[in-house]
Amino acid sequence: MSFSQSHPGYTPAEIMTIEASRRLKDGTVCFVGIGLPSAAANLARLTHAPDVVLIYESGTIGAKPDILPLSIGDGELAEFADTVVSVPEIFRYWLQGGHVDIGFLGAAQVDRYGNINSTIIGSDYAKPKVRLPGAGGAPEIASNAKETWIIIKQSLRTFVEKVDFLTSVGHYEGGDSRARSGARGAGPTAVITDLGVLTPDPTTKELVLSALHPGVSVEQARAATGWDLKIANLIKDTAPPTQLELVTLRDLHSRTAKAHGITLAPD
Amino acid sequence: MPLADAVRRHVKDGQTLALEGFTHLIPTAAGHEIIRQKRRNLTLIRMTPDIVYDQMIGMGCASSLEFSWGGNPGVGSLHRFRDAIQNGWPNAVTISEHSHADMAGRYQAGASGLPFSVLRGYVGSDLPKHNPNIKSITCPFTGEVLAATPAINPDVTIIHAQKADRKGNVLIHGIIGIQKEAVLAAKAAIVTVEEVVEDLEAPMNSCVLPHWVLAAVCEVPMGAHPSYAHGYYDRDNAFCKEWEVISRDRDRFLEWMNAHVLGTPNHAQFLAYAGIR
C-alpha cells in the first residue's frame, strides 16, 4: 500500500473502489465482474446499499459473500445467494431477459467511447503481443444491461484512442452509433478510475472528465489518457473516503486475504 | 468403472471433447488420465479453460480450442495456453473464440437437438471478424438481426459431480454451470464423482443426471482438485498460485507433469505423490 502526499490516509485504488461503490443505489440489480467491480459492489452492500442485488455470471443471484471471491464461481457466492441457476439461465433469462440494471465491468483497455478490450494487446489477432483471457460474459453484459459502468486504473496503457480489439461495445463510434448497432441499454454511463470519473457527452458520447479525486489535477488525468481528453465545464470533486468506507473496505480485503491464503491481484 | 478404462473406451484421438466445470467441479482427474493415455489432436471445448486445459495443451493433447475465457482464475494467465497460441509450443493450437452467453447457448442448442443457437450478442464486437462460426440471422417475425452460432455436440463430455448412487444416477449441486447441457449435448458422457452412495437423497428439482444418459460413472475422490467440490473440499488456492510459477517455464512444466501425472498410475497416487490430503 503506497500513500502519496496528495492522498493522505488512503490509496488511489481505495478511493476508486469507494467512489464506484457510492454510485450503487440500494435495491439496484447489478451484474458484477470479478476483481475491482466485485470489491466496489460488495463495499456498497456492506455500507449504504444492503439490499443491492449482486449477480455473478456463474449463476449466483443475490450473492452476499463475506469475503471477496477469487473467481467468479467461488462457493462463497453460492453459499449465501438467494438462488443459484445454471449459466445458460443467467445469461438468457436474467441478462438477456432485461432484468439487469447495471453491468459492472473491468477492462484491459478502454477507448474514448467506452469500448472495452479484454481479448488481445497488439494489432494482429493471430499473433498478439499479449493474449488476454478473452471476452467471458462481457460482450452481452455490455449490450444488454440497462447501463454499464467500467472501473479501471487510468494510464496511457489502459486509456487508448482506439482499443486494439473491440471485445465489448460501449458507445461504439460515438453519437447514436451504439443504438443503431442494435445494442440495448444506455451503454457506459460512468468510467471510474483511480484519478476521477468520466461520463459520456450527451450528444457525441465521448468520455469527458467530470470528477476528480481529492488532490488529483486535470493535468494528471490528461497525462494518463491516450487521447485529447475533454474536461467538463463544471468538474466535481470526489468526496474523500469516510472512516466507515475505509474501515469496511480494508476489513473486506483483510478477511479475503486471510481466507484465500493468498494476496489478490493488486488493485 | 475405473477412470482409466472409461477414458480408454470412450476417448479417441481426433475427437471433440468437452471437460466442463465453471470454476467449480472441474474434472481434473479425467484430464490427467487423458494426458497419461497420450491422446492427440483433440478439439477441446470449454467455456473457461483453466489449469487442466493448460496441462493438456502443454502436453500436446490438443490441436484446437473453443472457449470464451481462458485464465487461472484470480491468479493470472495460462502460460501453456499462451505459449501454444503465440509460439506454437509444443504444437500449434487453433482457437475459436466466443463469449460466455454464446457458449452456453451453443451447448443448449446441442442438448436441444437444434443445429444452431441464437442470441442478442456480439453487437459491435470484433469477435465475429475473427471467428467465421459467428454469423447473423434475421428473425422471420420481427426482422431483427441476431447472432447465430453452431450447436456444440461433443463426441465426449466429461464432468465431475458430488455423488452417484449404485445405479449410476448422478447428483450435482452448487454452481452447476453448463454441466447438464454439456452432458446432454454429447454423444457420450463420462462423470467422475466424489463418492458412490446407497441413496442420493436428492431434494426435489435438484440436478440429477439419470444413469441412462451417461456412458460411464467413475468414483474419483478429490477428482476436481485444485478446483473445489461444494460440500466436500475447497479450492486449493495455494496450488493455483503455484501453477503460475510451474507453468511459466517449459522445462519446469514438463518436469512437473512427468513426475506428477505421467509418473503416477492414477489420481489417488497423484494426490499421494503431490502430498494432497
Image: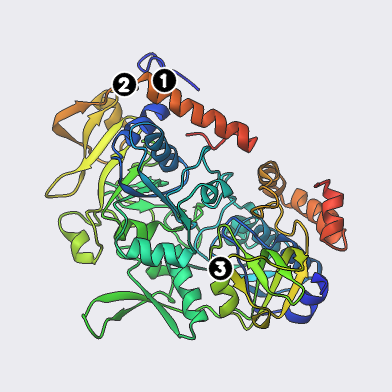
Residue under numbered circle 3? B204
Residue under label 1: A10
Q: Is residue A140 above or below residue A82?
A: below
The three-letter amino acid code for the residue at tag 1 is: Tyr
Type of residue at label 3?
A: Met
- Does B77 sit above or below residue B262? above
Image position of B118 with respect to B114: above or below: above
Most foreground residue, B142 or A226: B142
| Crowd rating for badge 2 (residues with CA inside 10 Å; few <14, some 14–19, many 20+) | some
Which residue sits at x=69%, y=46%? B236
Cα distance between the residues tagged 1 and 2: 9 Å
* Circle 3: element type: loop
* Mark 1 belongs to chain: A
Left or right of residue B36, residue A9 in this image = left
Where disc 2 sits, the SS reads loop
**In-front residue for pair A10/B123:** A10
- Label 2, on which residue? A240
Q: Is residue A174 left or right of residue B258?
A: left
Residue A137 appears at what percent x and percent y?
A: 43, 58
Q: Position of residue B277 (x, y in %)?
A: 81, 46
Q: Are marks 1 and 3 in contact (CB under 8 Å)?
A: no
At a point 85% along the width and 54% down the height, the residue shown is B259
Q: Residue at x 47, y 46 (%)?
A: A34
Residue type indicated by callout 2: Pro
